[in-house]
Amino acid sequence: MTTLIAFSGSLRADSFNTRILKALPALAPEGTNIALFDIAELPMYNQDLDADTVPPIVEALRAAIAEADGVIIAGPEYSGSYSGATKNLIDWASRPFMKGPIIGKRSMVIGATPGPGGGARVVEATSALLTALGGTVVGRANAAAIHEKISADAHVITDEEFAQQLRDGLAAF
Ligand SMILES: Cc1cc2nc3c(=O)[nH]c(=O)nc-3n(C[C@H](O)[C@H](O)[C@H](O)COP(=O)(O)O)c2cc1C
């Protein structure tokens, strides 16, 4: 059994990136379990909060990453890079110093936009962050015009090329 923990870097209720994460179980190899972790209530990283006792959601975040075989981050592209929410979760998961659960972790990075850029820059920037933390990015997927590639009423990827990128990434864990 491969256990993956998935995060959306968009807090928007109808986020395309969150919807992509919900579509992943149908594309994953048998024996892969994907759990979506909601980071909407994660406080902004503050080293004063990062003490012997941390907020319960931070404890849960760190435990979920530590127990998982890999991490999936699907992020919106904001101003040519990752969102503050994506960076914030990575900052919390990168600590304690040298022992943060995301350090050295295998990951898959996804980016999708309704526009023509297709999230290529957010995938690159997020991958660079995870690599800087000693991780290996085993899969990458991005899509332009995402509103035309995911069904409106269900979490199904309707574009075969994008679906295959996602399948390949999940199979690489
Ligand atoms: C603050 C902000 C910055 C954005 N910057 C970019 C950008 O640099 N490139 C891009 O392709 N789309 C950009 N967009 C559009 C997002 O890709 C679009 O809103 C997308 O739907 C966000 O992802 P989500 O659906 O998962 O929330 C930006 C949107 C916002 C709100």
Image (spheres, grey):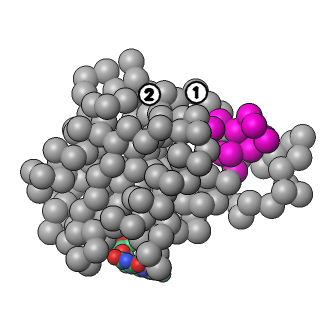
Mark seen at residue 160: none
150 in magenta:
no
23 to 106, vertically: above or below: below
Position of 15 with respect to 59 (left or right) is: left
Pointer 2 or 1: first along the chain = 2
Q: Residue at x 21, y 46 (%)?
A: 165
- Label 1 is placed on what type of residue? Glu
Name the residue carrying label 1: 67
- Label 2 is placed on what type of residue? Thr
Position of 37 with respect to 31 (left or right) is: right
| Magenta span: chief secondary structure | loop
Which quarter of the figure is the N terminus placed in? Answer: top left
Name the residue carrying label 2: 3
Residue 28 visible in the current orientation: yes
Residue extent of the magenta highlight: 92-103
**Foreground residue among 39 and 73:** 73
Q: Position of residue 57 (x, y in %)?
A: 69, 47
Position of 138 with respect to 59 (left or right) is: left
Which quadrant would residue 30 be assigned to in this image?
top left
Q: Residue at x 58, y 34 (%)?
A: 104
Q: Position of residue 81 (x, y in %)?
A: 47, 70
Contact between marks 2 and 1 (CB within 8 A): the answer is yes
